[in-house]
């Protein structure tokens, strides 16, 4: 298991760059921003392989640039019934659903990833108790690959906030299972510091920083995929969130996940540099 990344490390999340950015340019962007790791989606790996990179090539360029693969994203098939949902390719605008458990665990194995990031995409009639059982099973299967699993709550999903995510993860009670706290989702969900205080810091396995206006958007899903702001460039109280995470002893690396049409329009190296600079400025203010 790759657990080298820690609280002092920054991770450039795949979503901070356009989906069309090559693997090589993702590495360049991460280096430009001073990141220690990157996250990858299945589509990023598939493109690299189609361009002629071998797994050994990918591992070598990561090692040569001092980078690790922090996480593979997104694990969408784990909730009850989700694996049976068929999404036509023409409707899969983010190129997600062609990569299931076999494919993404293989990517994690090939590149020595630290973790996988689990989300609820389709919802359904299941309860949080049933989700906990399914999450426990996912953790057990991921554990066979040496992977941590962190559950990311999404405000429009059946796991909409930190309280629901912690109910699932706590009930699943797996040593390799935990939570992703994404600032955008935290503040667009139910940002309750009291709930955060009840989560053991060791169970926060992923942190993602981004920003937004104070007032929620009318269409959260669209805003989440197109209109996020750089950390410190919006009105979310990132300082309070970071203080809360420090208070509970969270030791996760800090990812920067800024789905933004404006950021995606920049050259990858510039986007990476701006993301790293903005994040360090936010982190410096909390000290």
Image (cartoon, rainbow, N blue to C red):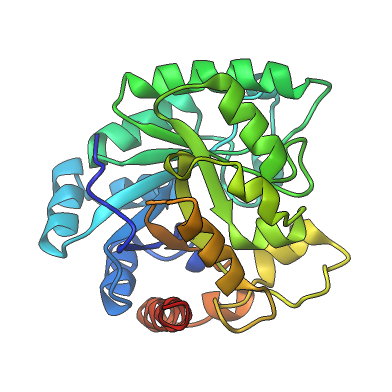
Vertical placement of 166 versus 216: above or below? above
Q: Residue at x 61, y 42 (%)?
A: 198
Numbered-mark total: 0
Q: Nearer the viewer, residue 271 or 188?
A: 188
Q: Residue 104 is drawn in which quadrant?
A: top left
Vertical placement of 257 versus 95: above or below? below
Residue 21 at x, y percent in the picture: 42, 66
| Image quadrant occupied by the N terminus | top left
User: Is 17 on the left-hand or right-hand side of 166?
Assistant: left
Q: Nearer the viewer, residue 119 or 237?
A: 237
Residue 80 in view (yes/no): no
Residue 255 in view (yes/no): yes
Residue 17 at x, y percent in the picture: 47, 68
Residue 19 at x, y percent in the picture: 50, 61
Q: Residue 239 is drawn in which quadrant?
A: bottom right
Q: Residue 83 is drawn in which quadrant?
A: top right
């Amino acid at each position: 298991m790759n657990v080298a990344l820690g609280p002092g490390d920054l991770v450039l999340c795949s979503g901070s760059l356009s989906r069309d950015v090559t693997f090589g340019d993702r590495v360049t962007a991460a280096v430009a921003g001073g990141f220690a790791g990157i996250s990858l989606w299945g589509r990023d790996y598939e493109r690299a392989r189609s361009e002629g990179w071998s797994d050994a090539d990918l591992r070598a360029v990561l090692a040569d640039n001092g980078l690790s693969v922090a996480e593979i994203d997104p694990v969408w098939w784990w909730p009850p019934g989700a694996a049976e949902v068929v999404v036509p390719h023409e409707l899969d605008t983010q190129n997600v659903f062609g990569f299931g458990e076999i494919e993404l665990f293989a990517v994690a194995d090939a590149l020595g990833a630290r973790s996988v990031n689990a989300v609820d995409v389709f919802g359904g009639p299941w309860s949080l108790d049933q989700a906990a059982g399914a999450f426990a099973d996912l953790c057990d299967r991921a554990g066979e690959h040496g992977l941590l699993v962190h559950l990311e709550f999404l405000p429009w999903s059946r796991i909409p906030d930190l309280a629901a995510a912690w109910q699932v993860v706590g009930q699943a009670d797996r040593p390799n299972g935990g939570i992703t706290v994404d600032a955008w989702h935290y503040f667009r969900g139910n940002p309750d510091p009291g709930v955060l205080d009840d989560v053991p810091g060791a169970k926060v396995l992923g942190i993602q920083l981004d920003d937004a206006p104070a007032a929620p958007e009318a269409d959260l899903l669209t805003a989440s995929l197109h209109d996020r702001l750089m950390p410190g460039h919006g009105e979310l109280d990132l300082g309070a969130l970071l203080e809360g995470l420090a208070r509970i002893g969270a030791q996760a690396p800090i990812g920067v996940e800024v789905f933004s049409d404006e950021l995606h329009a920049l050259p990858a190296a510039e986007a990476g540099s701006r993301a790293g600079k903005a994040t360090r400025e936010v982190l410096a203010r909390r000290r």
